[in-house]
Amino acid sequence: MKMNLRLNSEIQYLGRNHKIVALKGSTVVLQRSEGDLETYEFKLEQIISDSSFCGGHKVGRKEKKGNFEIHLDKLDKEKRDEVSWKYNLILPVLLLEKIKNGDVKALIQFNERFNKEYINKNEKIKTLSQEELIKRILKKLKKSNKSVSRSTFMRYLNKYRNYQKTGVTGTASGSECFIRANDKEYIQRADTYAIEICSPRNPDEVVDIIYTKYPVEYHSIIKSAIENKYLSTRKLKVSKIEEILETECSKAGLKKIPYITVRSLIKQLSERTVSIFRHGRKGMEAYMPTERGYSEKAALYPLHIVQIDHTKLDIIAASEVTGQPIDRPFITLGIDVFSRSIWCMHLSFDDPSSAKVRKAIIQGLFCKRSKERYKTTNEWPIFGVPSVIYLDNGSDFTSEHVKKMIDETLESEVRYRPRKTPHYGGVIERLMGSINNVLSELPGYTGSNIMDKGDRDPSSEACLTLKQIEQFIIKWIVDVYHFKEHKGLPLECNVPVLRYQTGCEEHGNPDFFPPEDEEIISLSLLPTSRHPYTRFGITKDHIQYKADILSHLIGKRETQYNIKYDDDDLTYIYFQLPGTGEYVTVPAVYPSAGVLEGLNRYEWNKVKNDLRAKGLLSRKNKMTDALVEQGRKELREMVEKTYTQKKTSRKMSEKIGFDFSTVAGSSQSQQSTSEKSIKSLLQVAKQKYSQRR
């Protein structure tokens, strides 16, 4: 559940009742409600991290303890889009209500998204009545041929308000109230099959799902006709698709599918799918992410706008065990445009992916506890849920997983920079440049181009491990960057940490998830996929997951269920029970969870590929415990054999987590350099950085 602290609200802290009398950015001033009525100042992180803390304004819904529920995950795309449409329909009225209660952030959101649509010239929004706004919304709908009656609109509005007032369990998403009752209670019938419709341009990309009672023999025929004939710019009519299906069914010795059934199958396709594949470029442009309105508007409050991007650092990291050079790591950073404070960071050797984006977002959402975790002098005060997250157009950012994370779990707005417009996103790119400049004084620095390197060999100089580089960057961010003047900020308050704190004093702290919800939110952000539950259980990537409590769901492969999975831990998956949004943990049974302990997806794929190349694994082979152990052993021997000669082997070792402490260690010069404290390295880099400015 999202929450925030507000002035004059009551909370429990350290076993006593307190009233919030002032909010000074990351500092909260509390007054005891009893006794001496003394006032005390505490850090926000200190208050919400304490087990005795209770209170605050609840923005979302309380999660169910134990297993967690995500009702939206059980809907197909069309029904999910319908839920979002209803929520966005009433959103202007919800924002107007907040505006009249003095919520400045709501006013900013309304002006950005709805001002031109519903507010007349020279009209003040606070003078606009709810009834008049509803009339204007309905009038606009009528023009777009999506007419909704006033009584229906009010039913949506009251349904949402009532849902917010009740203690209904579910996710942080209030839009869940728009899930139809028959969809919530729906348990897929044994005689109903799901057919995945894939992109005609990419057979591996599922773009929609349709349901039918026709048996399996018809599925490939229906799938092919829709993908290759109907979803085409030729814009064939339903009657023509019926003729094609009749011909193909006749060839296969099957009865023809009636016109009315063909029409109902095609009607299940979402408007988005039909528009993109039947209307060509115009259809694609109508649904491109850039249509969400990327712009370099000024951010008006803390965490109003966050920009996220990846880059490869201009420094080579060394092995923590042997001291030998590995590779340049990738860093993912998120910056608060309002204050230029760093919201999130993730550093690893992994290439950019939706998983890296997820890990960076998780780091930004929760309390950083940087003094405790990274030994910084100051705390890292910025955390919480952004209103808007701006991303690049790379596949790692535009994936459905990332969009659902931001849109549904965080209830934030996701926007993408227009293609071929490098000037957009300059805030985050300038930050990347600043970090690489700071790294230029460290051993192993490569420079931003070949000319910077000169006669030096960065690989031979490299001695800092990935953890040391991470600690160095975090100390620079928290203890240096956040306290330096920034040219992109107003002159009257041009220091990031001060700008963030004054912004919080003026507009209030961003919504946040309390520490006790960190695990449940992290789980809800995991990727989702669909699989059948057979007598072997769920089979994903040659691993079988099975649980006795799911034995009643054993059925045909056409009936599929949602699962969530973690690429860093293959020992279990989360299975969503049909008819509810509840996920339960299902362990690996073949290979066993014990054998999979410590494996991540990267190592698993390497083991599989090696076994397949040796002819020990085919599509129908089962991965036995013995086969997995053999594959891991041979992979380790191969990496160990080439570790000292090949950088690719050393990088693979880091991704897998192999410990090669017996392999040739680092040289004396490397050891002495790596023993330098992060603090002394930071002082040198800080001095050089200041001279440049």
Image (cartoon, rainbow, N blue to C red):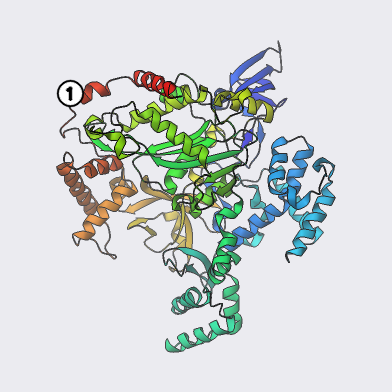
Snapshot quadrant of residue 16: top right
- Image check: 134 left or right of 588? right
Secondary element type, mark 1: helix
Q: Looking at the image, is 245 positioned above or below residue 293?
A: below
Snapshot quadrant of residue 545: bottom left
Q: Looking at the image, is 205 positioned above or below residue 245?
A: above
- Indicate the position of residue 439 as horizontal and vertical percent values: 36, 29
Residue 179 in sight here = no
Q: Looking at the image, is 314 positioned above or below residue 139?
A: above
- Image check: 612 left or right of 30? left
- Image check: 683 left or right of 577? left
Mark 1 residue type: Gln
Q: Residue reaching furthest top?
A: 36
- Image check: 585 left or right of 657? right
- Indicate the position of residue 283 as horizontal and vertical percent values: 58, 66
Q: Which residue: 50% across, 85% down?
A: 244
Crowd band around label 1 with a 10 angstrom C-alpha radius: few (<14), some (14–19), many (20+)? few
How many discs mark residues in the rendered view? 1
Closer to us: 159 or 462: 462
| Residue on which disc 1 sits | 668
